[in-house]
Amino acid sequence: MGVIVTVYNLELYVKEALMSAVNQSLKPDRIIVIDDGSTDNSRKVIQDFRANFELVTNPVNQGVLPSVITGIKMLDTDVVALLDGDDVWEPNKLFDVMDTFNKDDSIMMVLHNFKRISKDGSLIPGVDITQRNLNRINKLSEKMDQDELLKDSILSYKGVWLGSALSFKRSKLNVEEFEHWSLTFWGHEYSHQDQPLAAYLIASNPKDRIRYIHQELFRYRIYGENSSGSSTTLPKALKTLQRSKATLIRTQSIVKQLGNREDSLQRQEMKLLEVTYLEALYNNHWATAFKLFVSLFYEFWTMKERIKEIGRFGGVLILGPTRFLKLK
């Protein structure tokens, strides 16, 4: 088992993340830590942490996707597990993941459930949209093929948490081909790492399977500075949308290659349209925003989403994007 820990300006959290990787009940064979050009004290915290891992330091920030590719190229272990430098694994995470892989040679990817924690590490009650979808998949798995449910959710952006829950067989990924493909499209420095990687594995290994463990095997930290935190400033909201667009462009190209995923492709196209709408709205491009709003209203959004987006459109129109996001 090989572990890749990605870090960018996470001085407050990276020590806890590293401790959770090192203190696994099943010890990893190798741990690769990629410091992606941090400008805070992350590198010093990592260097002061006395444990057996390999540190790679990027002189400038390259983005999480190129950093993960660097780590994968360094590993020759059977299985690779990803860990974001602000998340925390439960002590039995690697044991349970490897136990799942060992039960079936056709499994290429293992995912699992998670807990949400705040900036200070306290548990956030309730479940988010991703967890609701995971609960749905877990229940439907009693009657339907779990593998197909997971693949459809990943390719259609219906909500399957990857990130620090993603482990895969190294032999199933042609990393040179994946690297070439991932750098072909606009915005590789902005793209998330997990969604394109999972989609690529699905496309490259159509007969192999994905398994989901319903146990909560990691703690996902949500706070203002990370991509799932509340976008209370206009620059952060636009940056989050930029990352979403770069990720969608990559996964959309994979879905097109599969050829038999029309429903997934249609949903991807609508998600990309939604991001474009929000960019237009927050940049005060009113004509474009209104045109996309009408299209999404009738073709994509649920009734609950329609009500939410009416409020957003009206709020931005009255208050302006900067004040609306601050009050939201």
Image: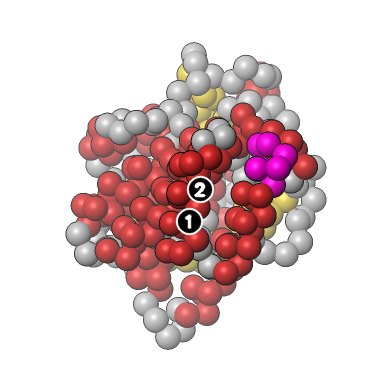
> How many residues crowd around disc 1 within 10 Å: few (fewer than 14), some, or many (20 or more)?
few
The kind of residue on which mark 2 rests is: Phe
Q: Which residue extends farthest front?
A: 287
Magenta span: chief secondary structure: helix
The residue located at (52%, 24%) in the rendering is: 36
Q: What element carries label 2?
A: helix
In the rendered structure, the answer to whether residue 222 lies left or right of residue 94 reads right
Residue 54: x percent and y percent?
A: 50, 27
Circle 1 residue: 294
The stretch in magenta equals 315-321
The residue located at (50%, 61%) in the rendering is: 297
The reply to whether dot 1 and dot 2 touch (C-beta < 8 Å) is yes
Examine the rendering and report whether any part of residue 232 can be seen.
no
- Quadrant assignment, res 152: bottom left
Q: What element carries label 1?
A: helix
Circle 2 residue: 290
> How many residues crowd around disc 2 within 10 Å: few (fewer than 14), some, or many (20 or more)?
some
Residue 192: x percent and y percent?
A: 46, 40
